Image (cartoon, rainbow, N blue to C red):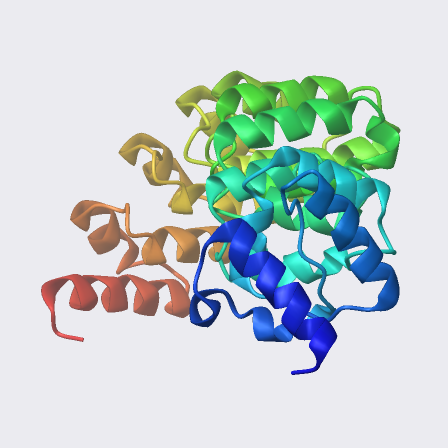
Amino acid sequence: MDEKEKVGTAIVERERELPLDQCGHKDVFFSEDTNNFLERLEEKNRLQTLITDKSGFTHEHLHFLADDKNSLVLMDSDYGNWLNLTCYVPAIQLNLCSQKELDLLSHMMGNKIIVSAVARSKRTSSSTLDKLATKASEDISDNVALLKDIASNAVTSSETLEKIAVKANRLTKWQAVALFEVICENPNTPSHILKELARDNWSKDRLLYAVAKNPSTDNYTLVELSCHPSLGVRVAVPNNPTVTVEILDELTKDKEGAVRFAVARSKYATRDLLEKLLTDQDEMVREAARWTIEKRSGDL
């Protein structure tokens, strides 16, 4: 370690009062500009941020930075000079960030790579995702990808998903469809939103397929989808966790073998329905029903 690194490490240790072996500051590098930066911070008697290159960035650095929102604001304004913020992404993806850290990082709307990683993280709180969705909706046409990330997160609340669905109506048809497809896949999406989307004339089969599989879809909508002209939509209905025996029974009469096959492989099909399919005209359907019965009885 050269003299510059020793000086920088000493500042870090003094300000944070943490032993060197716990924070990995051996990876911190200090250029002449960085030393000037640290001197300005030292005058305020507080080290607000750490300077590191991408390869040297550690979770401990992130932990320190999360102690003060001002440090993140400072880094954002000096982006490119002090810290390569993309270093945060691996820490987010590896679930090394706390909810506090993720909330702070969500303020960095200027860095789409970071906020996208925050939006996808299962450790991000629902309140943070809601605030992020509100910010993204301010310029919705430029943030469709970010809203899709938020909508795909299982942590996202039903209130936030409804908010995104309402805002999506301001988008072009194809942008809206892409966003609605993701919304329809989230089990937290309110049933009335799913019902509305299932009835829209311009809804695409992929969107309806997602509605048919969503456990939040109400029974009446499932009945409508079980009669949909699209084979792909009807095939999805037997795999919905809330599908009723009555719906499954009607699907055993479907003219397409693929739909009856889906019923035969459904874990929600009753024994009576499976035995009924043992006499189906399609050999693959009969075999699927037999396989499901044997699997449930433990013979497989």
Which residue is depicted at the point 38% across and 62% down? 285
20 over 40 or under it: above or below: below
- Residue 209 in percent (x, y) is at 58, 42
Compare residues 164 and 97 and report the one nearer the observer: 97
Q: Is residue 253 toward the left or the right of residue 10 in the image?
A: left
- Residue 188 in percent (x, y) is at 47, 30
State the quadrant of the C terminus.
Answer: bottom left
Q: Quadrant of residue 9?
A: bottom right
Which residue is depicted at the point 49% across and 65% down? 23
Which residue is depicted at the point 70% across and 41% down? 72
Compare residues 284 and 200 and report the one nearer the observer: 200
Which residue is depicted at the point 48% across and 57% down? 96
Asked if one can make out residue 29 in the rendered structure from this viewpoint, the answer is: yes
- Residue 232 in percent (x, y) is at 59, 49
Compare residues 68 and 142 and report the one nearer the observer: 68
99 over 31 or under it: above or below: above
Asked if one can make out residue 231 in the rendered structure from this viewpoint, the answer is: no
Q: Is residue 164 toward the left or the right of residue 140 in the image?
A: left
Q: Quadrant of residue 135?
A: top right
257 over 123 or under it: above or below: below
